[in-house]
Image: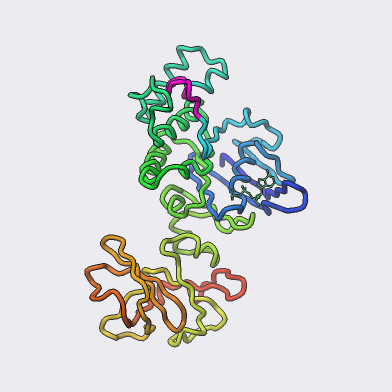
Amino acid sequence: MSQILLRSINKSYDGATQVLHDVSMEIEDGEFIVIVGPSGCGKSTLLRLIAGLEACQDGEIVIAGQRANEQLPQHRDIAMIFQNYALYPHLTVRENIAFGLELRKVPKRERNQRALEVARTLQLEPYLDRKPGALSGGQRQRVAMGRAIARNTSTFLMDEPLSNLDNALRVAMRTEIKALHRQLGATIIYVTHDQTEALSLADRIAVMKGGYLQQFDTPEAIYDRPANQFVASFLGMPPMNFLPVDKVPFWQGELGIEIGLRPEALSINRDGSGMSSLPGRIVLSEMTGSDVILHCETEAGRLTLIEERNRLSGGSGDVLIHVDLDRAHFFHGDSGARLDLA
Ligand code: ADP
């Protein structure tokens, strides 16, 4: 049985502007789902609906086989972790973690025992008697998670939980959240606008735009077979390149479509062989470590590709860019929908 079912959810805050359009999703027990999309596309609204903090106009939310639309948040067996994790500064880590249990009248001994277990899981045991002021940003974030975990719920909703952390900490916490998911076996629904977070964390990604669900699939499927041009451009870094086929001199197929080329479908053609090449000029190169990101101008448009640093002779100049058509994506010129050309 799927754990959370969203059936044709429509939501408007003011009765005039619709924020979610017919969103349907089936989330299995224990899955790590990431909802991703640009700011304002309705991610948080969707999460708040699942939590019971907002109501929808029509559609149905089913949790563990039961219609949940009318269920109060506290009856949903769901814990929510927000971006601005509010810890109580005058309480210790132990008391912060156990806080929700105290509200639920769990006896003190049991509360302390549970706080200790959770602190062990999150590697916070050495800090149990400290107050939040004496913790690092990452430790504070872990305490906030600890408070949610202590409640023993089966589902965690996380709304951009890492967005207030600096980059190094964000990367470290990402690994921790992934490990935690494995350890708890809980369902996690995680909202972010960061495509890297989505690709690295999710079992399945829900890509949203303007209140519409664009695609709901595994990171691999979304990367390899994006449903439309928006999904293709939103996931992947550097982003996919797009060229109108009409401007690609060696193109011999159907016209009126866009060709999508991820950087890995492009390479510098050194020996001048092969048919599918475009002359271009390197206008900018960015060193990333072992690789260099090359931005090239061609007559068909701008192309970004990645080359190994030690294979490059110079940083700029005229080049021939080889296009691997077997790895190209095609999209309808008007609608942007994916086309599978034979
Ligand atoms: P996201 O999380 O993707 O940034 P939100 O779900 O927060 O998007 O917002 C989606 C849309 O709903 C936005 O246009 C936003 O302005 C609007 N919105 C969000 N919350 C409210 C609210 N409480 N009242 C009215 N409009 C809201």
Residue 186 in view (yes/no): yes
Q: Looking at the image, which is closer to me, 43 or 250?
A: 43
Q: Residue 231 in the image: x percent, y percent?
A: 52, 62
Q: Measuring from the top left, give residue 120's x and y in whole percent.
A: 36, 26
The foreground one among 34 and 67 is: 34
* Residue 90 counted in the magenta span: yes
Say above or below: 273 vs 305: below
What is the quadrant of residue 143 in the picture?
top left
| Above or below for 331 versus 37 | below
* Applied colour scheme: rainbow
In the displayed structure, does residue 80 sit left or right of residue 58? Answer: left
Q: Which residues are magenta?
A: 87-97
Query: In the rendered view, does 306 fall on the left or right side of 73?
Result: left
Camera-side residue of 257 and 108:
108
Give the residue drawn at x 50%, y 64%. Answer: 233
Q: Position of residue 59 (x, y in %)?
A: 71, 46
User: In this figure, what is the number of numbered marks?
Assistant: 0
Quadrant that contains the N terminus: top right
Identify the residue shown where x is 53% and y is 23%: 100
* The stretch drawn in magenta includes residue 171: no
Farthest-out residue, right? 15
**For residue 126, side relative to residue 57 (left or right):** left
Residue 156 seen in the figure: no
Query: Which residue appears farthest toward the front when viewing the image?
Result: 133
> Residue drawn at (37%, 82%), measured in percent from left and top?
280
Q: Residue, x 53% and y 46% (percent of image)?
A: 191
Tell me residue 328's x, y (percent).
44, 73
Relative height, residue 288 to residue 331 (above, below): above
